Image (tube, rainbow, N blue to C red):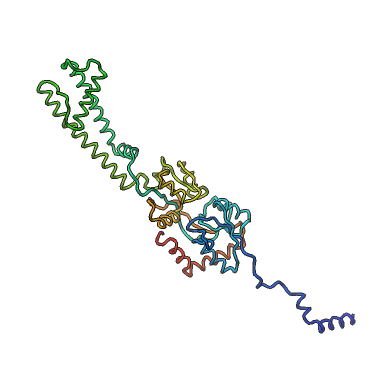
Amino acid sequence: MNLVLIASLLAALLFPAAAPCAVTTPSSTQPQTPLRVGIYVYEPFILKTSQGYEGFSMDLWKEIASELGRGSDFTSFDSIPDLLQAVSAGKVDVGISGIFVTEDRLKLVEFSQPFLQGGLQVMVHEKRGSSFMKIWNGLRESGHLQILGLGIAVILAATLIVTIAERRWNAEFHPDWANGLAESFYHVMSIVMTGKSSHKGLPGPWGRVLAAVWIAFGVGVVAYITSSVTSIMTVNSLEGIIKGPRDLPGHKVGIIPGTVGAQYCHNQALDTTPFNSLPEAVTALVAKRIDAIVLDAMTLQWYDNSHLELPITEVGPIFDKKSYAYALPMGSPLRQAINKSLLKQNESGFLETLRKQYFGDIQ
């Protein structure tokens, strides 16, 4: 026993560094592995440039990652659903883009504290002309069609009366009904539209009285048609046929699959056309292959402000309001640290500065 004790003391004296080495733990200053960050390029939240990735969500994330002392390995995905599936499966540590927090998505992933408020909006062609269907619908909704229908009935009745009178008093009139009705209709419409006709008129004083009354009726019909159509065209030109989400039924709506805007349109059973990106959808809108686009308001307004040369604009209020956040796997140990950093970015004013940089006074 004494020999063992003596040997231990000698070892400690001869090799003083041996004892500390036996209990040394890995240094906490060792660099940590980079975080696996999934992204979906979605302007202006994620933009791909020659220098790498930029955008509102990316710039904010770089501040958070710097504070966490972690690097980032980025993996790009083709859509938000693909990105969320990767987050849910644990293939990435965090998903960043313009991601709305929704009830369905909360079944797949957790979300960080929201860092931006938004919602959906409708984009339309700015030069909204008055097509035949727009004019027709406007006349119908304003009650003009009923009056015009009555006028047409009077014209047809007058055509029949003139034909019967001509067959009775004009021996040179067409003997067959088809040609007789055609000629009478031509004369009736000539008086209605121009106030003049080559027709010699009905015989007797009452014939002249009827002709004068008919000319007055024709002038009134033409004036009414012109004023009613002009008023409808003016309204359509000023307001457009699509003024907000309530006007979307019956029109072709551009969507980007996997977005909240696309889900809204499907829930409303709208006639949708899918596009891979917003620029593709806008190209179709400018070419009038679709009538509107439904997407989150921040993206639509940013794109509009960035492409002032295009005849596009947003109409109606922001609806179906939601929050933007980062997506995390269920039970992620990063959530608390990310939320803490987001609070710090908000309190320091960095988040507000970044919002104004990308969106100005949109909100």
Residue sitting at the far left: 205
Residue 306 sits above or below residue 347 on the image: above
| Image x and y of residue 324, in percent | 50, 57
Which residue is nearer to you in this view: 120 or 184?
184
> Viewed as shown, does residue 163 lie left or right of 110?
left
Where residue 24 appears, x then y in whole percent?
Answer: 73, 74
- Where, quadrant-wise, is the N terminus in this rendering? bottom right
Q: How many marks?
A: 0
Along the line of sight, which residue is nearer the eye, 18 or 75? 75
- Tell me if residue 275 comes above or below residue 335 in the rendering: above
Question: What x and y, as percent, mark residue 78?
Answer: 56, 51
- Of the pair 251 and 3, the residue shown nearer to us: 251
What residue sits 41% from the left and 40% below the top? 250
Q: Residue at x 38, y 54 (%)?
A: 309
Q: Is residue 361 left or right of residue 198?
A: right
Quick check: 6 above or below 260?
below
In the picture provided, is 168 more to the left or to the right than 125?
left
Residue 120: % across, % down: 44, 52
The image quadrant where one finds the C terminus is bottom left
- Tell me which residue sits at (57%, 56%) in the image: 76
Instruction: Specify the quadrant of the image occupied by residue 144.
Output: top left
Which residue is painted at 59% across and 60% down in the image?
Answer: 74
Quadrant hosting residue 299 = bottom left
